[in-house]
Image (cartoon, helix red, strand yellow):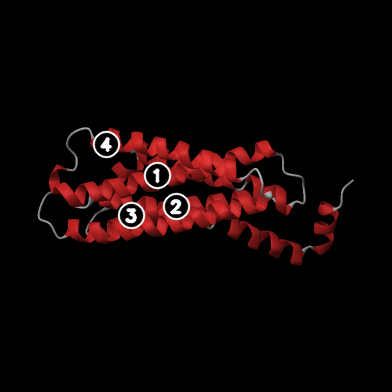
Amino acid sequence: MKYWAVAVAALYGMILVVLTVPVALLAFAPQASVKDVAPVCVYWPYWLWLGVMVLGQVALLVVPVQVASRRPVARRSLLWPVATAGLMMGGLAVGAMYSLREFAVRDKAFEGWFWWGALLAGLVIWCAWAVLFYRSSRAAEAGDVVSRQCRLMLKGSILELLIAVPTHIVARSRDYCCAGVMTFIGLTLGISVMLFSFGPSVFFLYAARWRRLHPEAAHEAETPA
């Protein structure tokens, strides 16, 4: 089951790379060359964000792996998906704030303390959601905890995209330099979290397929020694 979880996380990382670099260039710079793309590949904040998202996907799959393996789930194992889901909700809040900021002040979106203020607000929202997820996990089964978190992340990403998409359309129609950068960040975060919320479901599909193809091995793995 661990191999399937790694496969899901790797697939998620590859999808993010495709959506962030090639698709963005096709949408905003169709005439760009390989030389123009190279700086993105060495931009460390991009790889830091990508690493955080992939590691977060791995952390969210800790409990599903134990559930699919029919192993008991310790309460401390829930801390990883709880913290990860809270982080994703905080990221959605930051993306929405960035989008609304550019919509409201146009090309002055990059000025002042708003960058740091939005990150601080995202940190507070991360902690608040993590506490909420943890408290709700006390009286629920481990699998139900992850499923509920995924549903909330999916709803949150849809709500955030309902803010990011219209504001990005408006920003792209304006005539100032680099229009739509902050709204594009909002779009990226919304789509990333939406795909993120499907990780456990994709893993369970892989696990079910493996059991159908290897019924004897699955029975031996699920039978206690």
Q: Nearer the viewer, residue 6 or 117?
A: 117
Task: Tell me if mark 4 has few (under 14), some (14-19) or many (20+) residues whose alpha carbon lies within 10 angstroms of its own.
Answer: some
Q: Nearer the viewer, residue 171 or 209?
A: 171
**Which disc is residue 193 wearing?**
2
**Which disc is residue 196 wearing?**
none
- Dot 3 corresponds to which residue? 187
Q: Is residue 103 left or right of residue 139?
A: left
Task: Tell me if mark 3 has few (under 14), some (14-19) or many (20+) residues whose alpha carbon lies within 10 angstroms of its own.
Answer: many
Query: Which numbered disc, 4 or 1, marks the residue that appears first in the sequence?
Result: 1
Q: Nearer the viewer, residue 165 or 151?
A: 151
At which x and y percent is residue 110?
A: 19, 40
Q: Mark 4 and mark 1 in contact? Answer it, CB < 8 Å.
A: no
Task: Tell me if mark 2 has few (under 14), some (14-19) or many (20+) residues whose alpha carbon lies within 10 angstroms of its own.
Answer: many
Residue occupying image coordinates x 43% and y 54%: 156
At which x and y percent is residue 182?
A: 25, 47
Q: Amino acid at mark 2?
A: Val
Furthest residue in direction left, as rendered? 175
- Dot 4 corresponds to which residue? 115
Position of 164 relative to 98 (above/below)? below
**Which disc is residue 91 wearing?**
1
Query: Which numbered disc, 4 or 2, marks the residue that appears first in the sequence?
Result: 4
Q: Mark 4 and mark 2 in contact? Answer it, CB < 8 Å.
A: no
Furthest residue in direction right, as rendered? 225
Q: Mark 2 falls on what kind of element?
A: helix
Q: Mark 3 falls on what kind of element?
A: helix
Query: Which numbered disc, 4 or 3, marks the residue that appears first in the sequence?
Result: 4
Distance, label 4 to label 2, CA atoms, is: 20 Å
Q: Amino acid at mark 4?
A: Trp
